[in-house]
Amino acid sequence: MNIDGDIVTKSFAVEDFDDLLKDLLSEIELRNYRITRINHIDNVLDQKERGLSTKMKFKHYKIVEFCNLNSCAEMISSDMRAGVFMPVRFIAYQGRDQSKPQVSFLRPTRFAALFGAQGVMDIAVDLEKNMNDVLEELVY
């Protein structure tokens, strides 16, 4: 795996991280994907306010999981093991010393290549295009 080539990352010049997250969710849903879960890893920061010690190097960190049930069913029909990579994710994050938040994702075609099933790759190509399109629509 080539981390720099297999993980797509884009920075955004946005003032409010919550605006970026809200826009990210909207763009995902506009493409007929369902948000299945958002992990708010940065909620751990609340522990610091309650007196618990934390040593985190980030201000914001969200894991956004989503899927399209039809595409998911098609991919799994091509290889039932493909579900180990579902749902797909974006991470939205900002380091403590970073001025710009970032959004990253693992290219779906990279994990699809593990299966060797054309049906898995076909769905992954479309999914990867949609994920790139989401990031391109986030303009600030």
Image (spheres, rainbow, N blue to C red):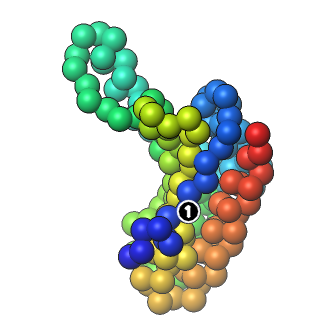
**Residue beneath the point at 33% across and 11% down:** 49
As displayed, is residue 17 above or below residue 137?
above
Residue position for label 1: 8
**Can the viewer see residue 87 in this picture?**
yes
Taking depth in this image into account, of 97 and 129 the one nearest to the observer is 97
**Residue beneath the point at 68% across and 34% down:** 14
Tell me the amino acid under the disc marked 1.
Val
Q: Quadrant of the C terminus?
A: top right
The percent coordinates of residue 22 (x first, y second) are: 67, 34
Taking depth in this image into account, of 131 and 136 the one nearest to the observer is 136
The percent coordinates of residue 103 (x first, y second) are: 57, 49
**Can the viewer see residue 38 in this picture?**
no
Is residue 39 toward the left or the right of residue 35 in the image?
left
**Secondary structure category for the residue under label 1:** strand
Is residue 9 toward the left or the right of residue 60 in the image?
right
As displayed, is residue 138 above or below residue 128?
above
As displayed, is residue 103 above or below residue 71?
above
The percent coordinates of residue 31 (x first, y second) are: 75, 55
The percent coordinates of residue 18 (x first, y second) are: 62, 29
Q: Quadrant of residue 43?
A: top left
> Outermost residue toward the top?
50
**How would you rate the neighbour count of disc 1 (Cα within 10 Å): few for under 14, some for 14-19, many for 20 or more?**
some
As displayed, is residue 68 above or below residue 64?
below
